[in-house]
Amino acid sequence: MTPKMAKARCEECPIKDGVFVPPEQHPAPRFVILGEGPWKNEAEKSRPFCGLSGRILDKALSNAKLLRRQATVLNATQCYPGRKLSQKDWNVAVNCCRPAVNAIIGDLPVLALGEKALTSREPGMKGIMKWIGVRINGTFPVFHPAAASRGPALLVPFNNLVVRFGQILNGTFKPLVWPKIVIHIDQKTPYEGAQHE
Ligand code: SF4
């Protein structure tokens, strides 16, 4: 079969019969938004991040003073399977799509949304919650906006993380500086007194 994207190993992919949602490629992108995979909505509209997750993402990007139209937007896997997949099949699909994804990303900074986006960039790395907000070779992992849509407990941290990614890109990020700690030793502490008794 002809690969759906240059360098993709579609022949070996468990979702090769799925609906292909093409990446939204900017001619000269500042950064890349890498999601997990298209879902029903995206498959119907043939556009990544066009549903509720996309609206949450767009709002966070706006708060981060970033524009989606400055970015290339794609997924770790570009096809919507239309059925439930095992974790093993997802892993194979991410591996098959990775060469094409990497060719599009090149050296650009990546906002990686969700577990599959993280493992697409860094094979073998698991557990997105352990890595959120940690820059790894130009990749900035954040949990997926679909998780943020489930309630304000994750919506606010999602927004803050995207804002931090924007600050890094815009050169306005200031690392946390711990305040100077001065310890005054009280000469009259009961402990000191106790030593002289
Ligand atoms: S997910 Fe990627 S590798 Fe798999 S069939 Fe679609 S384009 Fe090809």
Image (spheres, rainbow, N blue to C red):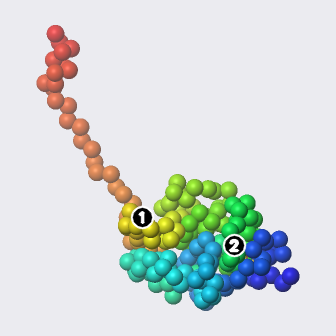
Q: Look at discs 2 and 1 and give the one toward the viewer.
A: 2
Residue at 21%, 14% (x, y): give it.
195
Give the x, y percent position of residue 136: 57, 61
**Image quadrant occupied by the N terminus:** bottom right
Which image quarter: residue 38?
A: bottom right
Mark 2 burial class by Cα count in 10 Å: few <14, some 14-19, many 20+: few
Q: Nearer the viewer, residue 27 or 116?
A: 116
Report, in whole angstroms, how far the alpha carbon at label 2 lies from the one at label 1: 27 Å
Q: Secondary structure beneath disc 1?
A: helix
Q: Secondary structure beneath disc 2?
A: loop
Which image quarter: residue 23?
A: bottom right
- Toward the front, the furthest residue is 83
Q: Which mark is residue 83?
A: 2
Instruction: Give the amino acid at mark 1.
Output: Leu
Q: Which mark is residue 154?
A: 1
Q: Is mark 1 within 8 Å of ligand 1?
A: no
